[in-house]
Image (cartoon, rainbow, N blue to C red):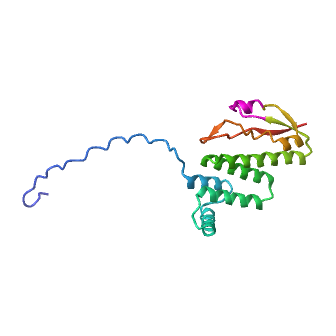
Amino acid sequence: MKPKGQVKKVEEKERPAKPQAKAPLKKKTQFDQREESLRTLAQFYLGEMDLKMRMRQMTIASGKEPPEWMAALEILKDSIIKTEHPDLKLKMYQGMVDLLAKVGQKEDLFIIQQVIARYNLKSFKDMGFERVEVEVAKDACPVCRKMAGKRFRIEEAMESMPIPCHDCSTEVDEVKGYCRCRYFAVF
């Protein structure tokens, strides 16, 4: 089929240059508080609606909006109080520790680690054990390594609280002092 009339020669438009490869993305130095808070809550079948509601409650109570991680910690704290399952309580406490490490709250992190250690000691005592042994991570700091294999009577460990080690120099998520020592019951 022939076109009627003249055919105009269309000049080629300049095509934009192909986009050059993007520079590699820099590694995130700061984490996304909301994403990390939701990830922590998701471990316990809690989610975004729970976080929004708690943030609204905290905003009304204090007059200012709290950080998401703080609201997530409050949700976990309430859940720990409500649950009667000891293993779930310990998992929630550990979730709190991990979130506190991400936000750099070393003192609060240490306090919750002490709660976990006391809870473990109490559980061992309730099961009839009288002694515990300290086990340390493979890459533990020098101070923690000195504790490796030490045995304590449970009452002695509850009084002196040798772990978590207050002088721990292990660094996790830019928080120095994330002690990963644990008690194990011994016969």
Position of the C terminus, as image quadrant, is top right
Please give left or right for residue 132 compared with residue 24 in the image: right
Q: Which residues are magenta?
A: 135-146
| 115 w.r.t. 132: above or below | below
Q: Nearer the viewer, residue 40 or 13?
A: 40
Please give left or right for residue 110 compared with residue 24 in the image: right
Q: Residue at x 68, y 60 (%)?
A: 75
Please give left or right for residue 90 compared with residue 170 in the image: right
The outermost residue toward the left is: 6
Q: Residue at x 60, y 49 (%)?
A: 103
| 55 w.r.t. 170: above or below | below
The outermost residue toward the bottom is: 60
* Residue 82 % position (x, y): 77, 62
Residue 144 lies within the magenta run: yes
Residue 130 lies within the magenta run: no
Please give left or right for residue 75 compared with residue 174 in the image: right
| 184 w.r.t. 88: above or below | above
* Residue 139 % position (x, y): 68, 31
**Marker count (numbered):** 0
| 114 w.r.t. 60: above or below | above
Position of the N terminus, as image quadrant, is bottom left
Q: Nearer the viewer, residue 126 or 175?
A: 175
In terms of image quadrants, where is residue 128? Answer: top right
In terms of image quadrants, where is residue 2? Answer: bottom left
* Residue 49 % position (x, y): 60, 64
* Residue 161 % position (x, y): 81, 42
